[in-house]
Image (cartoon, rainbow, N blue to C red):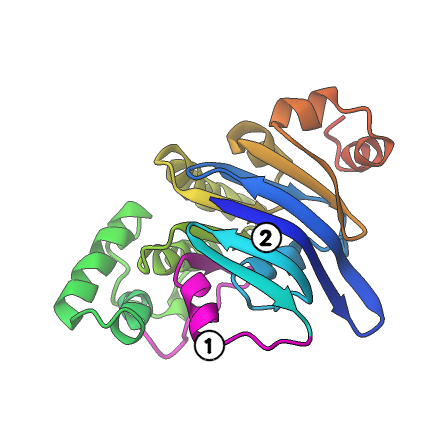
């Protein structure tokens, strides 16, 4: 489903991704963990081309892109990848001047060219799915952080993506609101949505992930099942990280 080969990204003099290679199966949940500054979010943003890699290749479904810093990507090449991915951001990124319903309809109307009636029907169904069917006429500022993030998930799903990318979706939430967002994500995982999640929620990674990817200093240090990564690995850098986050 997703294949990344020798992906590299540099910002000024800093090598943020130093040749990342990995694969993620269709219908699986892959969780990326690691210390701050390890390149997790940059890798996630490269998967939907919010950041353009300098080198390497990316395959999502049947679409393949080769990256070269000297060669600029064509817009239609970028859009082909972006249409396959939905993104859920750390800080929600909802349009404040639109209602919850309008936020979920907007991309459908503009990008997918759906009718207003079809977009509305899809949005209402997704709001029910994330437990917010009675919040459609509210504005983002009238919702809690957890509710806003669930709207963000519904908005991503409205575009019928093949993959949903989550960039630390609970890190901006009060602890008591984290559970409601993780519950929605767990349900998506059970339904077979392909998900790539950058998170510090180790219990979610342990209980829900099919694949756990540990990154440090721009490389993949460990990559395996939750059992392999959390319980069987002898990698000292990983063990040091897990001890700090009270997993071991």
Residue 172 in view of the camera? no
In the image, residue 228 lies at what x, y percent? Answer: 67, 23
Which residue has dot 2 on it?
Answer: 168
Q: Is the C terminus in the top left, top right, bottom left or bottom right quadrant?
A: top right
Above or below residue 66? Residue 200 is above
Which residue has dot 1 on it?
Answer: 75
- Label 1, secondary structure: give it: helix
Q: Residue furthest left?
A: 117
Above or below residue 83? Residue 235 is above
Seen at 77% across and 33% down, the residue is 242
In the image, residue 246 lies at what x, y percent? Answer: 75, 32
User: Are the residues flagged by discs 2 and 1 in contact, CB closer than 8 Å?
Assistant: no
Seen at 86% across and 31% down, the residue is 236
Labels 2 and 1: the sequence-earlier one: 1
Report crowding for label 1: few under 14, some 14 to 19, many 20 or more residues within 10 A (C-alpha).
Answer: few
> Closest to the observer: 134 or 121?
121
- Label 2, secondary structure: give it: loop
> Closest to the observer: 206 or 133?
206
User: How many marks do you count on the picture?
Assistant: 2
Seen at 81% across and 51% down, the residue is 217
> Closest to the observer: 223 or 174?
223
In the rendered image, which quarter is residue 144 located in? bottom left
Image: magenta residue range:
70-99
Seen at 75% across and 37% down, the residue is 245
């Amino acid at each position: 489903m997703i294949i990344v080969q020798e992906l590299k990204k540099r910002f000024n003099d800093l090598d943020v991704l130093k040749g990342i290679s990995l694969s993620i199966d269709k219908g699986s949940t892959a969780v990326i963990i690691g210390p701050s500054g390890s390149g997790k979010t940059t890798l996630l943003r490269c998967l939907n081309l919010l950041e353009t890699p300098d080198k390497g290749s990316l395959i999502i479904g049947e679409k393949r892109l080769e990256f070269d810093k000297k060669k600029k990507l064509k817009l239609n090449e970028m859009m082909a990848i972006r249409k396959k991915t939905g993104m859920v951001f750390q800080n929600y990124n909802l349009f404040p001047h639109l209602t919850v319903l309008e936020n979920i309809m907007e991309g459908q109307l503009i990008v997918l060219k759906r009718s207003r009636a079809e977009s509305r029907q899809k949005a209402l169904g997704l709001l029910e799915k994330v437990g917010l069917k009675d919040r459609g006429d509210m504005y983002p500022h009238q919702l809690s952080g957890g509710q806003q993030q669930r709207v963000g998930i519904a908005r991503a799903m409205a575009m019928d993506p093949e993959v949903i990318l989550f960039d630390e979706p609970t890190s901006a939430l009060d602890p008591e609101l984290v559970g409601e967002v993780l519950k929605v994500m767990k349900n998506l995982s059970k339904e077979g949505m392909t998900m790539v999640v950058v998170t510090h929620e180790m219990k979610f990674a342990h209980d829900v992930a099919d694949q756990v990817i540990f990154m440090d200093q721009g490389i993949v240090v460990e990559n395996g099942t939750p059992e392999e990564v959390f319980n069987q690995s002898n990698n000292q850098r990983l063990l040091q990280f897990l001890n700090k986050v009270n997993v071991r």
